[in-house]
Image (spheres, coloured by chain):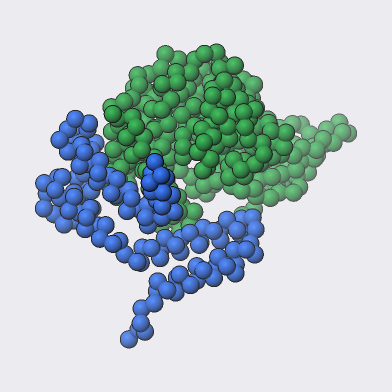
Chain colours: A green, B blue
Amino acid sequence: MTLETAAVERFVAEAWKADAVTASGASMMSGGAIQENWALDLAVTRDGRTDHLETVLRTDAPSSIPQSHGRAEEYALFSAAHAAGVAVPKPLLLGRDVAGMDRPFFLMQRVAGQADPRKITRGDLTGAPLARALGAELARIHSITPGAEGLGFLDLPDESPAKDRVAEFRAALDASERPQPVIEWGVRWLELNAPPAPDALVLCHNDFRTGNYILGPDGTPAILDWEFAGWGDRHADLGWFCAKCWRFGQDDREAGGIGPRAEFYAGYEDIAGPVIDRDAVPFWEMLATVRWAVIALRQGDRFLQDGERSLELALTRHVVPTLEIDILDQTGELHA
Amino acid sequence: MRDAPFTADLIATARAELKAAILPQLSGDAAYAGAMVANALGIALRDLEGDDGADAAERAALRALLDCDTDDLARLNADFADGLRQGRFDPGQDGHDAARRILWMQTRARLARVKPAVLAARDETSAER
């Protein structure tokens, strides 16, 4: 895979009215199943002065999964988050219909640090301060509400955030060739226990977990991966972050495998005020488990049904039984 | 005629060689890919070794719960999933406890195949309690 750096140079020069732009050091960073990230260094010359920028160019992967926003929408989300004071890599430029580039892309500041969840959860920057910092970041994200500039493309929930998920999971199960009784059981439990629509809708990140932030060497996180964001219930993000399946084996650190839940909540409420309903979070942790199981199922179907010969996709399918154990454990505790 | 079937031994030996001689030499993305290959070979190996009658037990339990005499396990599971969705095995319904036992049986059988270590660790923890 290659990057058309000459096209990027021309685009940046025109957008920033620069006299000259030189791109160098293009290299593919660890990309996801949905998009590709390239490290790219830019030398931008304007009025006789040259600025050196370390950037990331983010573009769609050749194959992506449904329910994720495109790059233009993701750029709008990055921009809204940046404007709300969320620690994110600074968004720089959005390229749509750029001559010489076959897919939309955007440029953002490159942030140094670690994103590998297994390394973060086993590293020495875990603990109460990180849990508090991430709680505060999540609260800043949730300070963005419907009507925010540039986010008009996000749909409001149909029935309620929880009931909408139930419908979405059933549609996904119906699209899969093999019946999944344990996941059906979990979805039925969600249906029976779904809370009503919240009083206030907020911008949910919808993939806020360890693995989706870069942890700087000084312990400061920068929040990534905005492609699933949408209007929802704040407890959905709190539950997703704390769910057992996102603790990477560090089960006693209930906040994302990195710190105590109480510190995470405290960091959140430092910014948002006392708005967390502690009793509401277990429902959303259960929903998180079912949602990840449905996604893993879909990834596996790309291997089983769609013929994508990727070992990673095939093995993601095999995450499902561990999630099923969590589903059965949680319904056992919660059903009574 | 083919020689004696030795597929399982072959995969087991290849996997052991991969883990002993190759994985330690790898780093970064290659180490990650190597670990995935070892994991996949382990799953394939356990698939070859059969299911210890897990399918038969599951079939019998589903036939009893659903009062249905088909032998088609996929069909039984489709009916089971549908019943769960319709609420026929909700808490308070007659089949609830039996359905719950079957779900555990299915999950344990799947886990034994793909993540036996998780199952073993779980059983060890519950034995200590």
Task: Residue A97: name its quadrant.
Answer: top right
Report the label total.
0
Residue at horizontal 52%, vertical 36%?
Answer: A252
Residue B17 location in percent, x, y? Answer: 54, 70
Specify whether residue A72 is in view. no
Residue found at the far bottom of this picture: B1
Q: Is residue B74 left or right of residue B120?
A: left
Residue at horizontal 45%, vertical 70%?
Answer: B11
Q: Is residue A70 left or right of residue A331?
A: right
Q: Is residue A299 left or right of residue A51?
A: left
Residue A117 location in percent, x, y? Answer: 58, 42
Specify whether residue A1 is in view. yes
Residue found at the far right of this picture: A48
Residue A110 sits above or below residue A318 on the image: above
Of residue A85 and residue B98, the one placed in the foreground of this image is: B98
Image quadrant in which the N terminus of chain A is located? bottom right
Residue at horizontal 23%, vertical 48%?
Answer: B77
Residue at horizontal 64%, vertical 55%?
Answer: B28
Residue A134 sits above or below residue A25 on the image: above
Of residue A127 and residue A92, the one placed in the foreground of this image is: A127
Image quadrant in which the C terminus of chain A is located? top left
Residue B90 location in percent, x, y? Answer: 22, 32
Residue A261 location in percent, x, y? Answer: 53, 27
Residue B78 sits above or below residue A242 on the image: below
Q: Is residue A321 left or right of residue A92?
A: left
Task: Residue A209: name its quadrant.
Answer: top right
Task: Residue A98: name its quadrant.
Answer: top right
